[in-house]
């Protein structure tokens, strides 16, 4: 057992040497440890060959289930640690950082339950891992695989545990099958994995069951004397008895001595000597098996040591060459050490900036967080729940206290806006945390990718610690910044937004009244158009003889009365209207006759210079506009003479104006407003009605002219206003409209935050990591 302890220490030394060759820090407990497989023992054999019994003998306790029908249905890994202070009957089960003393029977029954629930038993996904501390077991990692003749076992599973490493292969063959050992699948697999047999041990189990069979005993003794078939690999063989002699007797209650286990092992050896009289005593029993395993581990280490020593010598030469390059005498002084540290920091800086600026490694995850997860979290905020009408009612009532709102529930709506926008803080903080984790990964990756830091593990840990502390402070600043952005939006809601709520509500009520009065209104407009045409300035001009300058022929009043407006209508539902309008030039302040086409379905008003042109010279998007009737302040030059001839009497204005809802935006090209003039009152009424219908359906407004010539429209506007004043509003309907408007405002603010929060994170975390973090790193070197 002492030999195994020495081999365990040697295995740890070899692991540390391998870590040094890979530029890992063997003293860093937090770094991932490179596993050493010298102390692994993998058991191969068929169902019922006694594999689990052999491992129980090595452990010294019957903790693994045994049985003739294949008790092991999934890989079981038993990581043994020897603790001499424990009694021979004590078993300590270690789970994470906790330890619990258990009995062998309880542990065996627990394993049986887990194995019975195992579905496939294939691969490491179904692996069962046990960490045990006893005073009887060698410090090995025992791997009990299912029987090779089970369907759950394939070559990939065996290679996963036994291939391409230094694990010892324990091939278990029952004594009754010793004569057919050459055809055993376990022997063939071991030969494929370990052709030279340097890490394979053959175990002949259940010798007591072959007692009396002279042929079987002769075959067993031949194998132990290395006189087996010629096609067998040259491996070491050991003989064991069944579980009933070696383990059951040691664990029976009748034996209460602390030395009962050693007594059982001695009894096993004596039994084997009496059965195998011609076999060497050094290959009989459990004690011989432990010695043989130690011998094979020692051989395997000797095979690996030359390559390891060569690698260490090469690494030493590299370090010496690096020291020579930097100057050994300089490194021995404080100034020289500082120069080396600064050089290593520059190498680390180059690697770090390459990750950040080029997206190398994990750098792309920063952009992915901004463009993917963060906007998705903003979109997934439960706006529907908060803007549900019942919830809006509750918030409005709670905000108003004992006195309900009069015109607009401003206080409640402001409270609702603050509540909903406050939910944007958590996605913003999560985005900061994600970027922080990415930056930490980049720091570690850059440190690992810097060759010089690998040669100085303590300095490497210090660099990573300084960078991590700096990133922690940047994360705190970024969280304060993004929370301030959200609070800024919560603290100030533009008053103009609530003013628009009232305006839109009044416009909506007026549109509803107009829809109800549409039939009677059309008749009144028709009568008014006839009256206006009868007294239009163009008609009076013609009756007075017209001007000396020839003008285009205007339609007569009789013709207008009979035919109505001179507009063309097309489309399946009459949604396209075309006709001539006079367009006022912003440069010359004159009028130009243009052919206009209105598409009510698309909400577009386009114009051409001539009717036969195919391509529009300009298009107005009406859904962004307001419509306004204006007075004709200055008549066009072509109509001055007719105005003079007919005296100062002023008729209804034929002019209307289209403007954008937003004051600083344009309507057409670079113009903030487009002023149009119809050729007749009937044309104007038709144009205004249709354009007004399109604009108001999109939420725009219409303002009628306040002229003496328009009593009909003025009276209609007054009647609509009177109706709004007289008709009581439905509070629930009004609140629904208001909540929709407020939701639109909140969604716009959330979209703004989705664009601005990443900017704040880049400023507070990424840019600071590129500058301040590296400055702190350099300043820490003194």
Image (tube, rainbow, N blue to C red):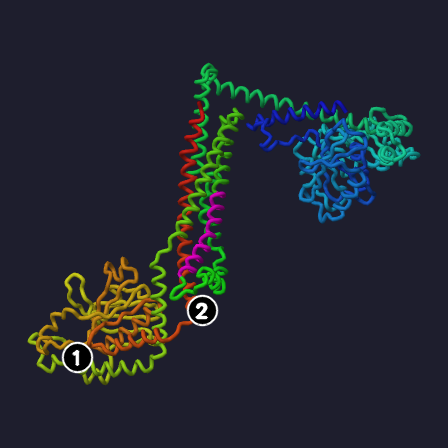
Q: Position of residue 544 (x, y in %)?
A: 9, 81
Q: Where is the C terminus found, in terms of image quarters?
A: top left
Q: Was residue 95 drawn as part of the magenta stretch in this picture? A: no
* Res 550 seen here: no
Q: CA distance from mark 1 to mark 2?
A: 48 Å
Instruction: Say which quadrant the N terminus sits in.
Output: top right
Depicted 243 relative to depicted 623: above or below: above
Of tags 1 and 2, the one toward the viewer is: 2
324 sits to left or right of 265: left
Left or right: where does residue 751 sit relative to residue 59?
left
Q: Secondary structure at mark 2?
A: helix
Q: Nearer the viewer, residue 131 or 313?
A: 131
In the picture of the structure, the residue carrying the numbered disc 1 is 536
Name the dominant secondary structure of the magenta segment. helix
Question: Picture coordinates of residue 414 (x, y %)?
Answer: 41, 57
Q: Residue placed at 82% from the left, 33% from the top?
A: 204
In which image quadrant can residue 75 be found? Answer: top right
Provide residue 59's location: percent of width, then percent of height. Answer: 78, 33
Residue extending farthest to the top is 329
- Whichever of callouts 1 and 2 sits on the residue coming sooner in the sequence is 1
The image's mark for residue 732 is 2
């Amino acid at each position: 057992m002492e030999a195994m302890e020495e081999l365990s220490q040697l295995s740890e030394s070899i692991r540390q040497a391998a870590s040094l060759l890979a530029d890992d820090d063997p003293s860093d407990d937090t770094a991932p440890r490179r596993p050493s497989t010298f102390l692994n023992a993998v058991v191969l054999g068929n169902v019922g060959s006694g594999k689990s019994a052999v491992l129980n003998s090595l452990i010294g306790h019957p903790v693994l289930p045994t049985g003739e029908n294949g008790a092991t249905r999934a890989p079981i890994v038993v990581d043994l640690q020897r603790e001499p202070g424990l009694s021979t009957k004590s078993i300590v089960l270690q789970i994470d950082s906790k330890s619990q003393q258990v009995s062998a029977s309880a542990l065996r029954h627990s394993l049986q339950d887990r194995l019975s629930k195992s579905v496939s038993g294939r691969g490491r996904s179904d692996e069962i891992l046990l960490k045990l501390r006893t005073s009887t077991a060698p410090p090995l990692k025992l791997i009990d695989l299912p029987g090779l003749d089970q369907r759950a076992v394939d070559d990939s599973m065996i290679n996963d545990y036994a291939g391409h490493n230094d694990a010892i292969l324990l091939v278990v063959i029952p004594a009754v099958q010793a004569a057919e050992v050459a055809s055993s699948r376990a022997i063939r697999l071991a030969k494929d994995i370990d052709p030279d047999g340097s890490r394979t041990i053959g175990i002949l189990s259940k010798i007591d069951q072959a007692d009396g069979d002279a042929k079987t005993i002769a075959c067993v003794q031949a194998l132990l004397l290395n006189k087996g078939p010629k096609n067998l690999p040259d491996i070491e063989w050991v003989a064991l008895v069944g579980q009933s002699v070696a383990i059951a007797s040691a664990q029976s209650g009748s034996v209460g001595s602390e030395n009962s286990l050693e007594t059982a092992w001695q009894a096993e050896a004596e039994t084997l000597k009496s059965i195998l009289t011609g076999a060497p005593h050094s290959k009989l029993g459990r004690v011989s098996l432990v010695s043989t395993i130690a011998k094979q581990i020692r051989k395997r280490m000797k095979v690996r040591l030359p390559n390891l020593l060569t690698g260490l010598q090469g690494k030493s030469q590299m370090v010496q060459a690096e020291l020579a390059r930097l100057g050994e005498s300089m490194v021995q002084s404080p100034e020289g050490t500082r120069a080396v540290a600064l050089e290593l920091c520059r190498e680390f800086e180059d690697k770090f900036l390459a990750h950040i600026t080029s997206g190398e490694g994990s750098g792309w995850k920063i952009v992915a967080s901004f463009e993917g997860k963060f906007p998705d979290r903003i979109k997934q905020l439960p706006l529907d729940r908060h803007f549900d009408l019942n919830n809006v009612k509750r918030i409005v009532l709670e905000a108003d206290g004992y006195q309900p709102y009069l015109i607009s529930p401003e206080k409640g709506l402001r409270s609702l806006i603050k509540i909903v926008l406050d939910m944007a803080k958590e996605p913003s903080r999560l985005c900061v945390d994600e970027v922080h984790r990415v930056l930490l990964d980049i720091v570690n990756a850059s440190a690992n990718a810097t060759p010089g830091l690998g040669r100085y593990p303590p300095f490497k840990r210090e660099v990573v610690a300084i960078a991590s502390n700096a990133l922690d402070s940047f994360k705190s600043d970024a969280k304060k910044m993004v929370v301030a952005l959200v609070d800024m939006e919560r603290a100030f809601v533009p008053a103009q937004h609530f003013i628009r709520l009232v305006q839109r509500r009044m416009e909506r009520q007026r549109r509803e009244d107009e829809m109800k009065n549409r039939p009677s209104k059309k008749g009144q407009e028709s009568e008014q158009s006839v009256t206006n045409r009868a007294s239009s300035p163009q008609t009076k001009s013609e009756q007075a003889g017209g001007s000396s300058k020839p003008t285009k022929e205007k339609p007569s009043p009789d013709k207008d009365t009979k035919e109505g407006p001179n507009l063309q209508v097309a489309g399946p539902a009459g949604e396209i209207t075309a006709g001539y309008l006079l367009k006022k030039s912003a440069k010359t302040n004159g009028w130009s006759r243009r052919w206009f086409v209105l598409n009510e379905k698309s909400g577009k008003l386009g114009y051409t210079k001539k009717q036969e042109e195919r391509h529009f010279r300009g298009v107005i998007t009406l859904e962004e506009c307001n419509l306004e009737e204006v007075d004709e302040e200055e008549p066009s030059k072509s109509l001055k003479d007719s105005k003079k001839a007919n005296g100062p009497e002023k008729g209804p204005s034929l002019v209307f104006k289209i403007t954008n809802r937003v004051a600083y935006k344009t309507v057409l090209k670079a113009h903030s407003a487009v002023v149009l003039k119809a050729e007749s009152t009937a044309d104007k009424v038709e144009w205004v009605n249709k354009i007004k219908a399109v604009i108001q359906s999109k939420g725009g407004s219409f303002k009628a002219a306040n002229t003496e010539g328009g009593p009909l429209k003025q009276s209609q506007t007054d009647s609509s206003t009177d109706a709004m004043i007289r008709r009581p509003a439905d509070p629930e309907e009004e609140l629904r409209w208001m909540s929709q408007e407020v939701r639109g405002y909140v969604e716009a603010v959330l979209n703004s935050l989705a664009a601005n929060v990443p900017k704040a994170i880049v400023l507070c975390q990424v840019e600071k990591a590129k500058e301040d973090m590296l400055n702190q790193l350099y300043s820490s070197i003194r």
